Image (cartoon, grey):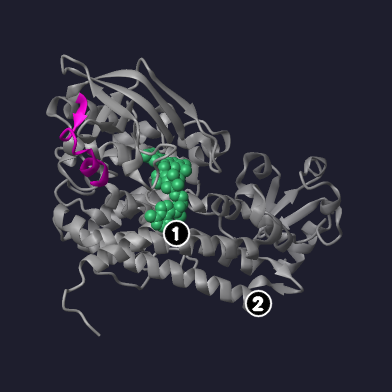
């Protein structure tokens, strides 16, 4: 029987529909349809090939849910599935949905075999282990599930997210894909960018973002006995840490912090009093890397959760899965051994990881902008208005052009800076890259907000609806300002970049 006739047989039953090459019986489902029964009885849909109508309104994942999969009663014999469900671990074939180095036929001088293998393993790991938990926790606000944290620890992801360094020594990284000695910032970039693909901003921070910024002072400035206890606990996912610098009166202006630490008379303890605001992972942290004001300037202390430490959740525009906390310290007794770095040299300890933190944020911003490009290209191609797909409108194409240009520019600039990081000692990075990283972060977050705004416009009402076709766009638009504020506000960083440049101006420079 020719294909068309086979399709006719199916559609003879008006409670059956065809989606792509699959036949579904809707008779028992129609009264349960969240969109109402009437749309299913529409003569354009009931008993018809409903592929276009379905994909105009639903994401592919709907078809994969067990309750809807059960409605499938057959396939159109002899036809090959055209619209394939997303495959675990697969690369997207949508143009610009992947950075160029992952796109077929393109070349890159930066990525070696181990980067490519790590990317493959990470994509599969994120799809299989993290994605579902990310969506669920972003919705219910609980902290990331321990089984995910444990699985990440098994392949040493917590350690690898700290970047290259001595803390990797002796560890088997992702079953040996890359050795500790060859692990570089491009490996870290790959990890950050793959994690970002889950498209859940609060969960991204909840997934131990506090550790990425709170542990470096312990690693680099902790006394050996403290470091050797705390680092393994944290990197194995058994204990959690956060970085507590910001206060109600000290955000961009770190020097304004007021939390005080005074020594006891015997000199064995610090007594800490004060409050910290917006501390990522603070609600569930066991350790607080805390910036304090001391007699001789600022000093950073590692404060374990205990008597006098209280944390309360702060509700922000993203999910409380991030563990954003208001912390109070009330006469907290901290052993002097918990001092990180020199007394009075705390500013240096606090600033020392800022470049890395900002660079990590650039990695994720670049990747998630690409995710939005993919969503917009797919949506604009499948959504029909006024008799043609949205992509047929020049104004929509112009918006997508801007998104692609920004995503490509940011990734290329990011890779250039990452290459410099791989070839500079830490001190040289601090001298030469603070300005460029500040500029890149500031540019990335401005671009991201433009992209979010344009994406909402392209998705229309769905772009501001928390479920369905536009759910990632709504989430992105709601949470995109986080990147423009955290880790250094956009304006402050742009200004920092210029001030750094001015400082390097040759004395004899004249027009
Ligand atoms: C969800 C969330 C999580 C956070 N996590 C942490 C954390 O884990 N640890 C931590 O210590 N902190 C954390 N923070 C705090 C964050 O680092 C600060 O919010 C940030 O530094 C900005 O400080 P502020 O909000 O007090 O803004 P302000 O310092 O009051 O600045 C307000 C605005 O003024 C402008 N501005 C300020 N100064 C300048 C300047 N010199 N030049 C030009 N423009 C300027 C900027 O546009 C800025 O956005 C978090 C914040 C949020 C919202």
Q: Residue at x 44, y 59 (%)?
A: 445
- Above or below 72: residue 340: above
The part of the chain drawn in magenta is 338-352
Q: Is residue 351 magenta?
A: yes
Q: Earlier in the sequence, mark 1 or mark 2?
A: 2
Q: From the image, state whether disc 1 or disc 2 is nearer to you.
A: 1
- Tell which of 223 and 201 is nearer to you: 223
Say whether mark 2 is within 8 Å of ligand 1.
no
Q: Crowding near pointer 1: few (<14 within 10 Å), some, many (20+)?
A: many
- Quickly name the residue at label 1: 445
- Quickly name the residue at label 2: 392
| Residue 351: x %, y % from top left | 26, 46
Residue found farthest to the bottom: 511
Q: Residue at x 45, y 69 (%)?
A: 406
Quadrant containing the C terminus in the rendered view: bottom left
| Residue 355: x %, y % from top left | 28, 52
Q: Is residue 380 magenta?
A: no
Count of residue discs? 2
Q: Residue at x 15, y 58 (%)?
A: 428
State the SS at label 1.
helix
- Above or below 40: residue 379: below
- Tell which of 232 and 438 is nearer to you: 438
Say whether mark 1 is within 8 Å of ligand 1.
no
State the SS at label 2.
helix
- Tell which of 412 and 224 is nearer to you: 224
Q: Is residue 351 left or right of residue 391?
A: left
| Residue 481: x %, y % from top left | 50, 52
Which disc is residue 368 wearing? none
Image quadrant where residue 115 sits: bottom left
């Amino acid at each position: 029987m020719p294909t068309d006739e086979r399709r006719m047989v199916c559609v003879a039953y008006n409670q059956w529909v065809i989606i792509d090459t699959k036949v579904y019986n809707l008779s028992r489902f129609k009264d349960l349809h969240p969109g109402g029964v009437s749309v299913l009885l529409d003569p354009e849909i009931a008993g018809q090939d409903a592929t276009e109508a379905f994909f105009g309104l639903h994401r592919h994942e709907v078809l994969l849910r067990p309750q809807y999969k059960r409605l499938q009663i057959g396939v159109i014999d002899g036809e090959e599935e055209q619209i394939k469900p997303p495959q675990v671990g697969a690369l997207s074939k949508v143009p610009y949905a992947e950075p160029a180095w992952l796109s077929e036929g393109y070349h890159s001088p930066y990525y070696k075999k181990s980067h490519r293998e790590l990317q493959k393993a990470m994509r599969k790991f994120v799809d299989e282990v993290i994605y579902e938990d990310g969506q669920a926790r972003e919705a219910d606000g609980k902290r990331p599930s321990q089984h995910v944290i444990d699985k990440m620890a098994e392949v040493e992801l917590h350690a690898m997210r700290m970047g290259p360094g001595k803390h990797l020594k002796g560890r088997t990284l992702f079953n040996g894909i890359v050795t500790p000695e060859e692990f570089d910032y491009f490996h870290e970039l790959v990890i950050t960018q793959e994690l970002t693909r889950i498209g859940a901003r609060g969960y991204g921070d909840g997934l131990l973002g506090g550790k990425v910024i709170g542990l470096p002072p312990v690693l680099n400035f902790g006394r050996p006995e403290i470091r050797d206890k705390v680092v393994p606990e944290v990197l194995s996912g058994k204990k959690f840490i956060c970085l507590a610098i910001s206060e109600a009166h000290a955000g961009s202006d770190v020097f304004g912090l007021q939390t005080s630490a005074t020594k006891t008379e015997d000199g064995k303890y610090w007594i800490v009093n004060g409050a910290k605001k917006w501390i990522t992972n603070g609600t569930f942290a066991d350790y607080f890397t805390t910036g304090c004001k001391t007699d001789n300037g600022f000093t950073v202390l590692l404060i374990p959760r205990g008597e006098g430490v209280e944390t309360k959740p702060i509700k922000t525009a993203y999910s409380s899965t991030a563990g954003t906390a208001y912390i109070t310290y009330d006469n907290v007794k901290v052993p002097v051994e918990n001092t990180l770095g020199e007394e009075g040299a705390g500013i240096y300890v606090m600033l020392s990881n800022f470049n890395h933190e900002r660079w990590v944020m650039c990695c994720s911003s670049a990747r998630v902008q690409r995710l939005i490009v993919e969503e917009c290209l797919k949506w604009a191609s499948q959504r029909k208005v006024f008799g043609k797909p949205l992509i047929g409108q020049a104004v929509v194409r112009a918006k997508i052009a801007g998104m692609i240009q920004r995503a490509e520019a940011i990734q290329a600039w990011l890779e250039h800076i990452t290459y410099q990081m791989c070839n500079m000692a830490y001190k040289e990075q601090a001298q030469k890259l603070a300005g460029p990283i500040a500029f890149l972060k500031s540019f990335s977050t401005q671009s991201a907000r433009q992209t979010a705004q344009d994406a909402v416009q392209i998705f229309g009402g769905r772009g501001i609806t928390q479920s369905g076709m536009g759910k990632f766009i709504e989430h992105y638009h709601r949470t995109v300002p986080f990147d423009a504020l955290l880790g250094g506000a956009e304006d402050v960083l742009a200004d920092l970049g210029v001030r750094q440049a001015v400082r390097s101006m040759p004395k004899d420079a004249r027009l």
